[in-house]
Amino acid sequence: MPRPTPFSTDHTAFASTARAGFASQEARVEGEIPPWLRGDLVRTAPALFAEGRWAAAHWFDAIGMLYRFHVASPTSVTWSQRLLECDAARAAQRGEMPMSSFATPNTRGALDRALHPVPARSDNTNVNVLKLGPDWVAMTETETQYVIDPASLSTRGRVRYDDALGGDLAMIAHPHLDVARRRVVNVGTRLGASAELVVFEHAPDERRRVEVGRWKTGEFPYVHAFALTPSKTVLIDHPLRARPASLLWSNRGYIEHFEWQGRTPTRLVVIDRRGGPTRVLETDPMFVFHTVHAFDDGDALVMDVIAYPDASVIDALRIDRLRDANITAQASLVRLRLDLATGAVRREVLLADGFEFPAVSYGQVNGQRHRRVWGARLVRDADGLRSTLVRLDLERGDLATFTDGDVVYGEPVFVARPGATAEDDGVILAVGSSPSQGRAHLAVLRADDLTRVATAHVDVPLPLGFHGSFARA
Ligand SMILES: [Fe+2]
């Protein structure tokens, strides 16, 4: 059987030097970083696309790389990176992948599959890195979360939850924080004869999850993110669904079991955080990776999402199409207003020419109406993948943008100035890499108008990745 052609990452937005292991260097700082911005930006990105006989079939399956920009002073930034230490990386280096991945077939033989109908799920925690209490935690969409040492970027071990929810709950990589109540809120999926989506919460420094509510369903959606308000969580049952039984005995990737049911509505499952009844509202079909923000508004709940007309974006991110992918071509910023008295859902397009990796001033607008949204618009043109950082003012409707030659920026991270009261009083941190120059940098931009404040250059490329966060020193 012909092997898939390994994805060559040379001179693309996905290039990296991750294979070499740990690396570190002093960044060259241009401009002056605000003196209050001291701390660590830790991020993750798919970086190792093929190794020996193994090759990822999808962007989401490349082995993750962790990297960190340590801001010590306005002129001193140290960068470091390390290929994620995990079982999936070690298996890939042996040329095999016995674990279930997102879209890459696992290499289990027929006997193994017969004896163990449910494969172990990948521990390639390449989606997000968040500080939960004292720990930096790397996450993906399985039961595995790894504690990361921020200095060495080594894996310290799995996060161990001491509770009744069990070790087989596949947790998503976009937990929310209820700032006022100091609670981490997240969602897990458990598969059996039917599927259960379980909403749970815990204090940031505790590892005992308390169930908030659960929703049982025959066919279950692919869940990447959810919405949180002070009173509710909203699960998005968009029509990309699978039957739990179809995953048994299979060596196909997880997402291959999901089917686009475009003639059926999107269901919005509203779970009351104080134990009230669960409501299921309906709207037109759409596909959502990322929610932007949500808030309560009287009898209504308002949630903004990055919506696609269907789930074809997932196929566009397969390795054989990734070089040509127009990542946000079909994305739009959509506001859903859920009237909980009547059950009606009103849908309004806030920005048709959309973006991905949405960010808000999370600490300031937590639980409240937001006015500003940041993101990265990733579009392919004749010269390759281009990216524009954007800031949208939802009241005035005006859009500020930032580009820098052929630099491809990923997710913007907002950091508030200490003592800030305005929603955009702070900076945006964005990591970008220039395919033509093979070098990357951390850009520090004013959050209000996206003008550049400072740049920390490194002389290696960093691959376009997913998510990460900043923690103050
Ligand atoms: Fe995400």
Image (cartoon, helix red, strand yellow):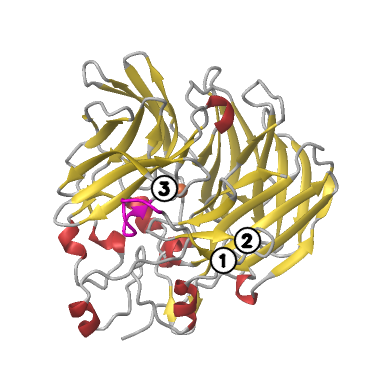
Q: Which amino acid type is shown beneath numbered disc 3?
A: Arg
Q: Secondary structure at mark 2?
A: loop
Mark 2, residue position: 149
Q: Are marks 3 and 1 in contact (CB under 8 Å)?
A: no
Residue type, numbered disc 1: Thr
- Does residue 60 show up magenta in the picture? no
- Residues 412 and 418: in front is 418
Asked which secondary structure carries label 3, the reply is loop
Where residue 100 appears, as percent x and y from the top left, is 33, 68
Report, in whole angstroms, how far the alpha carbon at label 2 lies from the one at label 1: 6 Å
Q: CA distance from mark 3 to mark 1?
A: 21 Å
- What residue is rendered at 17% in x and 62% in y? 246
The answer to whether residue 1 is seen in the rendering is yes
Q: Which mark is residue 208?
A: 3
Identify which amino acid the numbered label 2 is placed on.
Asp
Q: From which residue to which does the magenta span run? A: 162-171
- Answer with mark 2 or mark 3, whichever residue precedes in sequence: 2
Q: Residue at (23%, 35%) from the top-left corner?
A: 267
Mark 3: few/some/many CA within 10 Å (<14, 14-19, 20+): some
Q: Which residue is mark 1?
A: 155
Which SS class for mark 1?
Answer: strand
Q: Quadrant of the N terminus?
A: bottom left
In the image, what residue occupies the spot 27% across and 33% down?
A: 268
Comes first in the chain, label 3 or label 1: 1
At label 2, counting other C-alpha atoms closer than 10 Å, the crowd grade (few under 14, some 14-19, many 20 or more) is some
Q: Mark 2 vs ligand 1: CB under 8 Å?
A: no
Of labels 3 and 1, the one closer to you: 3
